[in-house]
Image: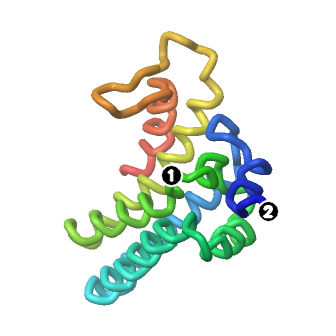
Amino acid sequence: EEKSHKKYAKKLKNRNNLNIRRKVLHAGSGLTFAILNQVLPKKVFVPGLTIVTTGTLIMELLRYRKGFGWINDVLHWTLGGSLRKHEMEGKFTGSLYYFLGVLITSTLFPTSCASLGICQLALADPSASFFGRQTRHIYWSRIENGLFGFGRNKGVLGFLGGALFCFPFNY
């Protein structure tokens, strides 16, 4: 019998797909975290997000192990088409990195600064991805092999699109 994560991977699109549903989920989740960070006391929000992040890490470590295929079934049922193909082929989902980024930001910075930073993440990342996807054919702007290990297969125009999208929210 085929493993559940391989079965789902065949149905999902790769990271080059526009995937609007994923971008809306990303923005909505980020804005929700920013609001929660703003309205909940830090002594409540940070421990709560630590539990979510730790739970996500445990899920990621277990879901490819024998006997835990049901986790992939639940993950696919919950997130469906928002997942990327590589996330069901053995890579961690973006949610772990997302939660960890929000946790570090809310822990290290004052509440208002952290909330604004989380909003920037929520809006800049999907908009940069959208603009990058729309300008992928402009080859001079592509960072093919990465810049010191970062930005592999990304584009300068996507970065600028994300930055321009967020510019009005800085004032």
Left or right: 24, with 159 as reference point: right
Q: Position of residue 72 (x, y in %)?
A: 66, 68
Coloration mode: rainbow
Task: Specify the label residue 123 is tagged with.
Answer: 1
Q: Which image quadrant for residue 64?
A: bottom right
Q: At 52% across and 52% down in the image, what residue appears?
A: 91
**Which of pointers 2 and 1 lies earlier in the amino acid sequence?**
2
Q: Secondary structure at mark 2?
A: loop
- The amino acid marked with disc number 2 is Glu
- The amino acid marked with disc number 1 is Leu
Out of 79 and 105, give the one closest to the viewer: 79
Q: Secondary structure at mark 1?
A: helix
For the question of whether residue 93 can be seen, the reply is: yes
Farthest-out residue, front: 1
Out of 36 and 83, give the one closest to the viewer: 83
Task: Specify the label residue 12 is tagged with.
Answer: none
Residue named by callout 2: 1
Give the Cα distance between marks 2 and 1: 41 Å
58 to 113, vertically: above or below: below
Left or right: 69, with 159 as reference point: right
